[in-house]
Image (spheres, grey):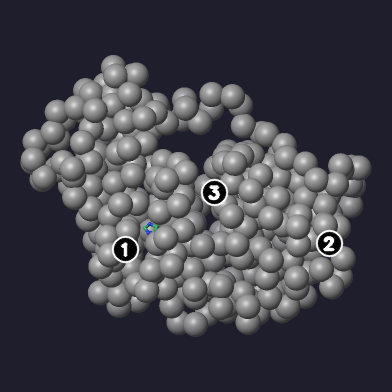
Amino acid sequence: MNSLPLPHNRIEVLLRPGALREGLIRDVASGFGASPKRLPPKYFYDDRGSGLFEDVTRLPEYYLTRAERALLEAHASEIAQAADARVLLELGSGSSAKTRLLLDAMAVDGLAAYVPVDVSEGALQGALADLAADYPALPTHGVVADFEDRLVDLPSPGRRLFAFLGSTIGNFAPPERADFLDRLADAMAPGETLLLGTDLVKDPARLVRAYDDAAGVTAEFNLNVIHVLNRELDGDLDPGDFRHRAVWDADREWMEMSLRALRPVSARLQAIGLDVEFAEGEEVRTEISAKFRKDRVTTELKEAGLELEAWWTDGDFALSLARRV
Ligand code: AVJ
């Protein structure tokens, strides 16, 4: 493997200045122009939204994070052994909360680097500072990037285990998911592996509770996108005009979150000169969260050139390990 001399710890920015804002403007203009209205889920995650998501992961109804953590705890050494990698590259690393389980299991064979990739430089800095305290000898190479578009440019200081956890892949609709997996597989060298976390199809009542919790934290998280739009685009939307909705789509096997207008809404996003109108009862879809079955995961990975080698599940959530062929 061709490895460049890396400074021990660094953060590299692969994000063009202004790219995030341009993307937001494009997504808002096209999403509010569409019928039905829609917004991509990535705009939930400003500092407040990231905090609310952390709160979601601790809710009694939101089993996903605990289930994935338990699977990682139970199987980290098998994963590390099968992956046989010298680099852990984590897509959408956020707070790197589950990373230590994998690092500890991999460290036995000597790790070349931890490469977290996240769109938030603040999150990367925080996560890497925390990690440095516990793993002073571990080289880290943080990458600030939108992993939706810069996969081939990711560093490769040794054979990599790619981790894409949390069922984040569920936010893609099937065509985007296929495109993402194709580009991810293209960025991987033969023999490199992907550890993928996917939430599974289950009793719809449990799914709805997980996305519409009794304490209303998910509702706040969903409504946070209104605050983000107001701040980023100088808007005057009133979060009090909207209600959180979470619905199971049985045909497409995904949870759908939306905001429903409680009354007619007439607002303006001043920064882009966009008038936004909602009829009473009209919704904007803010997220899909696809739920999987083993067959579908196997097939979709295979279509991208990734061979499923292992599947660990508790019945609710699954981790799969697939190798680039
Ligand atoms: C972070 C995308 C995996 O879909 O379950 C949590 C986000 N949305 N509650 C998910 C989320 C509502 C979460 N992901």
- Is 324 above or below relative to 145? below
- Mark 2 residue crowding within 10 angstroms, few (<14) / some (14–19) / many (20+): some
Q: Which residue is drawn at 61% across and 74% down?
A: 72
At mark 2, the secondary structure is loop
Displayed quadrant of residue 257 = bottom left
Q: Nearer the viewer, residue 312 or 145?
A: 145
Looking at the rendered structure, the kind of residue marked 3 is Phe
Q: Which residue is labeled 3 in the image?
A: 180
Residue lying farthest front? 133
Is 128 situated above or below 312? above
Q: Where is residue 3 in the image (x, y as percent from the top left)?
A: 89, 47
Ligand 1: give its quadrant: bottom left
Element under disc 3: helix
**Neighbour tally class for label 1: few under 14, some 14-19, many 20 plus, Cα within 10 Å:** many
Under mark 2, the amino acid is Leu
> Which of the marked residues, 2 or 3, is nearer the chain's N terminus?
2
How far is disc 2 from disc 1 in space, using C-alphas? 37 Å
Quote the CA–CA distance across marks 3 and 1: 25 Å
Can you tell which mark lies on residue 211?
Answer: 1
